[in-house]
Structure formats: structure tokens, C-alpha cells
Image (tube, rainbow, N blue to C red):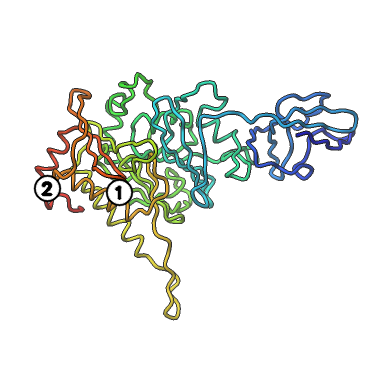
Amino acid sequence: MTVAVRSDPLQEAAISSASIMRPEADMACENTDRRQANTDNLHGHHVYQDRNDIVYRQLYTITIIGPAVTMTASTPPSTSFTATRINTTTFLITEDDSYAEHPFIYAKLHPNAPLLILSDTGCDSPRDKDHQIVHLKALLETHALACNNGLPLNPLQGGRRRDYMIICTHCHYDHIGGIEQLATRQATIVASKHGRSFIEEDLATHSLCKYRRMRTPRYRVSHWAEDREDLKWPLSSSMSKVNLGITTLQTPGHTPDSLAWYDSSERHLYVGDSFYEMGSDGMPIIFPKEGDWVTFMRSMGALRDFVLEQNAVVEGVEEGWVEVLPRVKVGCGHQTAAADAEEMVEAVVGIFERIIAGKVPVVMSEEVRGEVYDLWKEEGEGVRFSVRAPRRLCEEARRHRGGAFAST
């Protein structure tokens, strides 16, 4: 497609956003001096100005011929990520990684604070290294998305970007692999206080990085989150704070540092790798040798109680009328992004109770890291979950059957 735009030779050659309708195609973004467009031939990225004084680079070849500017659309940059919007403020980013984990990264543009809140950061290991955008930071700051009105999620605005808050659902490699590129002084990194020693001691082993022969990311946790803590921002300042409407929930079991968080404005719960459906990848819920099913079942009981509380909330009581709020949805670290939270937690508790009771067959066994791992999967069609874990975790849970799984 070619578009001709009139150009006043007495003015700068930058083309205003009022002159050209922005396509929903991918764009890149940078804070560029608009005067760089004052040349006879510009090849590659076209610049134009928007209302917020941000200069975007649209992928065009531009040729100035006399009083007209000719723009030819070019191929948008390739990327190892895909992005979709899952609610008003939140986007699901999926990484096509070299380990075939396909981790889910959630990015929330907070409406009341200059924050981009990330739930994990993926592997930072593209399956196809020839893609032009393979790092999460580049995607967030320079790759415009159709699902975000043709803009990057964190472009320069007035000379600065949103600060990052990274909520680490746990420290496995496919969730912290991209954290180092975002761990600036302006970034806030949140992790579970319950699993502090698990993160701070031998992270190479606990993250599983050493088993992937992957360099262990270096980062410093800014805030160790309590159970049912309401996050405010800035976290480390005595100045007035903004209530973010986010509650952290300690959910140890998959790992000691497992952390869920709840976005009250969107009524969306994020649980990391505590559970997820098999999905199109046929992915089992996986536990490392540091997992603990007894603790996991207690965590699931507490999570179920929390979701039931939120689903019971009503608003707008007036003259006998009440507003029933939407049911809480759940987003997981893989496969599942927006399922009914109450139903799914109940289903997960059910499958583990059946496994512990010996009602689900083991369909495969293998030795990993010096332990026998079993894969449990129910028979028949429409099976939503399978579980892969050290046999020892199931045996320990069987010894603790009964009241030990009650919420504490």
C-alpha cells in the first residue's frame, strides 16, 4: 500500500497523527527528534508525532518527492511473543520459548498509578532466535500491539515510561528468565516472604536453571509479601501511597515460594504454576522435588476460601436491590488464562484427592534428579488435568490424609 501526503517544505517533515490514520498494525516506539525526518529519503521507520509528544516509528519506506511524501508499508517486526487482552487493564503475553514451556506472562496497566505490573517474566529464551524482538523488555517498550490500540504497552510518555512492578509467582526458570532485563532501580520486585530462603539460598538449583544449563538471573527482591497483604505503591516510601487493589496470597506447595495475587478491580486471580489445565499442549501440573502435597492441599483450601469470599461480595444495596458482581476468574502460569476460579479450584482439589486416594492410575514413571516421578492421568475423554510429581510427595500426602488438609 502506498500513501501520498502533502508536505510543507517550510515545516519539519514529521507527519502528525492528525494527518494519517494510525493502522492497527504493529509499530515500534522511540523518543526521536522529529527533525531527523528532514531528509530526502528515509528508509525503514517513519516518524510521526502524537498528542503526548511521543514519536512513533511506523514500519514504512518513505520517499520525499517534491511536495509529496510517499510511504510504502513494510513488514512488521517478528517476535517470539504473542499478546491478547484478557480484561480492561490486563494483557496475556505468551512466549514461544526454546524449552516448549510457553509460559504465560500477565501485564496490567494500572489505571491509578504509573505502573506496569507484571506477573512473571518468562524464559527469555526464544525458540527462533532469528526473530527481531526476542526479549520481554523490547516487546513492552517498543512493539505496538493491535490489542492495545496500536501502541506498545510501556512507551515513552512525556520523557518517561511506567515503572515496573514484577510479582514473582515462584522462582522457576520459565518465570524469572526475563527478570534481569527489567530489574532497574525503578523496578519493584515482589516475592513470597514464606519462600524467602528458597529464593536466597541456591537459586541455581531451586530455579532449575542449572538443570537447563541456563545462566541464573540475578535480581534483588524489593518486597517480601505477606499472606493476604494489600499492596500499596510506592512500597518503600513514606510518602502518600496508592492502594493498588492487589492482594497477595501465599500458596506454598508447588514450591515453597509460590505466590498468587488477586486484582480486585478486575476480579481476576493469578496463581502461577500451582495449577492449570492440560490445554492444547497436554501439559501436566508439574511438581519439582522441593514440592509438598500436604502443604499444597492446605494452600488450595485457603485459596478456595478466598475465592468463595470474593464471590459472595455484593455492592449497591439500595431499596432492597443488590448488585451481584462478576464471578472471579483465574489466570494460570500456563494454558489457562480466564477460567471460573471457584469451579477450577474445586476441580483441582478433587483431582488431587482422587490421586491421593489411589483412584487415578499412574500412566508413566521415570527417574529424574535421583527420584522416581509418576504421571497420573484419569481415563476417558474430556480429561482436564494430569499431574507429574515425585512419587514421594503422593506417599507423604497419603500418610497425612484426613483433617491435615483443612485450611489453616
Instruction: Note whether 300 is above or below 182 in the view shown.
Output: below
Mark 1 neighbour density, 10 Å: few (under 14) some (14–19) many (20 or more) = some
Question: Which residue is more in the foreground, 34 or 98?
Answer: 98
The residue that mark 1 highlights is 227
Question: Which residue is more in the foreground, 321 or 248?
Answer: 321
Q: Is residue 16 left or right of residue 370?
A: right
The amino acid type, in three-letter code, at marker 2 is Arg
Q: If you read the primary sequence from the N terminus, does the residue marked by circle 2 or circle 1 appear first?
A: 1
Instruction: Note whether 336 is above or below 143 in the view shown.
Output: below
Q: Quadrant of the N terminus?
A: top right
Instruction: Note whether 101 is above or below 314 in the view shown.
Output: above
Question: Horizontal and vertical percent for residue 31?
Answer: 67, 33
State the SS at label 2: loop
Mark 2 neighbour density, 10 Å: few (under 14) some (14–19) many (20 or more) = few
The residue that mark 2 highlights is 401
For the residues bearing labels 2 and 1, Cβ distance under 8 angstroms:
no
State the SS at label 1: loop
Closer to viewer: mark 2 or mark 1 = 2
Q: Residue at x 38, y 50 (%)?
A: 330
- Residue lying farthest left? 399
Question: Horizontal and vertical percent for residue 93?
Answer: 48, 38
The amino acid type, in three-letter code, at marker 1 is Asp
Q: Residue at x 39, y 51 (%)?
A: 339
Question: Horizontal and vertical percent for residue 126?
Answer: 47, 25
